Amino acid sequence: MGKNDADVEKRFKAIVIDVLGADAKKLKGSTRFVQDLHAKSVDIIALIAATEGEFGIKITPHEASQNTTVKKTIDCIKKELKARR
């Protein structure tokens, strides 16, 4: 994992902690937004909006429905950032 990858992970986890009130110590790649963090649909919308704003990317509804864990979302962010280069 490169410096940029670690930065993406750190920044996204900060968003999850801020938006969902997640415990930083318990936040792992396998953490699921709905099942583990009890996110409601309005929380997911806020999470997507904050992520799009932080990284300057667009997350489609299809991508959002596929990104059920922290790791899947981080991978999606990295893919979107690479596509913009």
Image: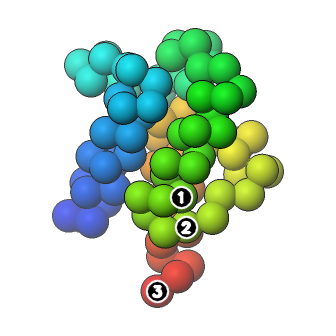
In the image, is 81 to the left or to the right of 22? right
Pointer 2 or 3: first along the chain: 2
Nearer the viewer's eye, disc 2 or disc 3?
A: 2
* Amino acid carrying mark 1 in the image: Glu
Residue 77, image x, y percentages: 50, 58
Distance of label 1 from label 3 (alpha carbons) = 16 Å
In the image, is 37 to the left or to the right of 62? left
| Residue of label 2 | 57
* Image height of 42 relative to 61, above or below: above
Residue furthest toward the left?
3
* Amino acid carrying mark 2 in the image: Ile
| Residue of label 3 | 85
Pointer 1 or 3: first along the chain: 1
Residue 59, image x, y percentages: 65, 58
Nearer the viewer's eye, disc 1 or disc 3?
A: 1
In the image, is 81 to the left or to the right of 49? left
